[in-house]
Image: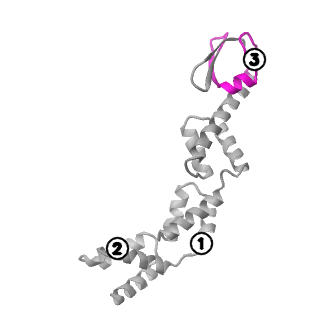
C-alpha cells in the first residue's frame, strides 16, 4: 500500500491515508521514528507492527499517568487500559513492562492494603474479599493476610467503642450489633466474647 496523505490529527496522533482508501491513526513518535512519508510503500505486516507500536506507546504513557495518581494491581491496571480503548495485546505488553520495571508489584500492593485494612479494624474475611475485588490474586491475598498481625478481639473491641457504641444503646442493640459484626467477617466466638466483656466492663 502507498501512503497518500499524512496529517497530524490530534495532539499526539497522526492520520495516515493509503491509496486503497484505508486510514489509520498512529502516534506521532512512531511516524517519525519509522520515517513514514507520502508515496512510501508499506505492507500489511509492517502496518500491523506500526499499529501495535503506536498502541503500546500510548497505553504505556496512559498507564504511567494513572500510576502517578495511585497504585494499581496488574489486573486492575490492565482492565483500566482496555476500558480506555487500548488493545488487549498492547495493554498486556505494557503491564509486563511495568512489572519488569517494578512499577507494579501485586505483593507490595497487597501488603500495604492488608496493613491498612487491619489498622481500620476490617476482619480478615472481609479484607480478603476487598483485596480480591481490587485485583489481587486470591492465593496472594490469603498468604499476605496470614502473615499480617491482627488481634480479632482488639479489632472488635475498637468497633464496639467506636462506630457501634451508640447502636448498643438502642432496642435490641446487642443482637443487631452481634449480627453486624458477624456479617463483617468476625467469628461467632470472638464477637460473643468481645460483647460479653464489653458489657461487663460497662
Where on the picture, by quarter, is residue 202?
bottom left
Q: Look at 32% across and 74% down and name the residue there.
A: 176
Q: Is residue 58 left or right of residue 161?
A: right
Q: Look at 35% across and 90% down and name the residue there.
A: 200
Q: Earlier in the sequence, mark 3 or mark 2?
A: 3
How many numbered discs?
A: 3
Residue assigned mark 3 = 42
Q: Can I make out residue 137 in this image?
A: no
Q: Look at 63% across and 38% down and name the residue there.
A: 61
Label 3 neighbour load within 10 Å: few <14, some 14-19, many 20+: few
Quote the CA–CA distance across marks 1 and 3.
57 Å
Instruction: Give coordinates of residue 55: x percent, y percent.
Output: 65, 32
Q: Secondary structure at mark 2?
A: loop
Task: Look at the picture and state if 200 lies above or below 24.
Answer: below
Q: Earlier in the sequence, mark 1 or mark 3?
A: 3
Quote the CA–CA distance across marks 2 and 1.
25 Å
Residue assigned mark 2 = 164
Residue 36 lies in the magenta-colored region: yes
Residue assigned mark 1 = 148
Q: Look at 59% across and 46% down and name the residue there.
A: 68
Quote the CA–CA distance across marks 3 and 2.
69 Å
Mark 1–mark 3 contact, CB under 8 Å?
no
Instruction: Give coordinates of residue 67: x percent, y percent.
Output: 59, 47
Q: Can I make out residue 115 in this image?
A: yes
Where on the picture, by quarter, is residue 86?
top right
Instruction: Give coordinates of residue 63: x percent, y percent.
Output: 61, 42
Instruction: Give coordinates of residue 59: x percent, y percent.
Output: 63, 37
**Magenta span covers which residues?**
17-45
Q: Mark 3 or mark 2: which is in front?
A: 2
Label 2 neighbour load within 10 Å: few <14, some 14-19, many 20+: many
Amino acid at each position: 500500500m502507498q501512503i497518500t496523505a499524512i496529517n497530524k490529527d490530534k495532539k499526539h496522533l497522526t492520520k495516515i491515508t493509503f491509496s486503497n482508501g484505508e486510514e489509520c491513526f498512529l502516534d506521532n513518535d512512531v511516524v517519525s521514528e519509522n520515517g513514514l512519508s507520502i508515496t512510501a510503500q508499506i505492507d500489511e505486516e509492517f502496518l500491523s507492527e506500526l499499529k501495535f507500536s503506536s498502541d503500546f506507546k500510548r497505553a504505556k504513557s496512559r498507564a504511567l499517568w494513572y500510576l502517578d495518581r495511585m497504585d494499581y494491581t496488574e489486573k486492575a491496571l490492565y482492565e483500566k487500559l482496555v476500558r480506555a480503548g487500548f488493545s488487549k495485546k498492547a495493554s498486556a505488553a505494557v503491564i509486563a513492562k511495568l512489572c519488569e520495571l517494578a512499577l507494579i508489584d501485586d505483593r507490595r500492593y497487597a501488603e500495604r492494603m492488608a496493613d491498612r485494612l487491619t489498622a481500620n479494624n476490617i476482619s480478615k474475611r472481609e479484607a480478603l474479599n476487598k483485596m480480591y475485588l481490587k485485583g489481587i490474586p486470591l492465593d496472594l491475598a490469603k498468604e499476605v493476610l496470614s502473615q499480617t498481625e491482627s488481634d480479632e478481639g482488639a479489632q472488635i473491641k475498637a468497633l464496639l467503642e467506636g462506630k457501634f457504641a451508640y447502636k448498643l444503646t438502642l432496642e435490641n442493640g446487642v443482637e443487631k450489633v452481634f449480627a453486624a459484626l458477624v456479617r463483617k467477617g468476625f467469628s461467632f466466638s470472638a464477637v460473643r466474647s468481645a460483647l460479653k466483656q464489653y458489657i461487663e466492663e460497662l
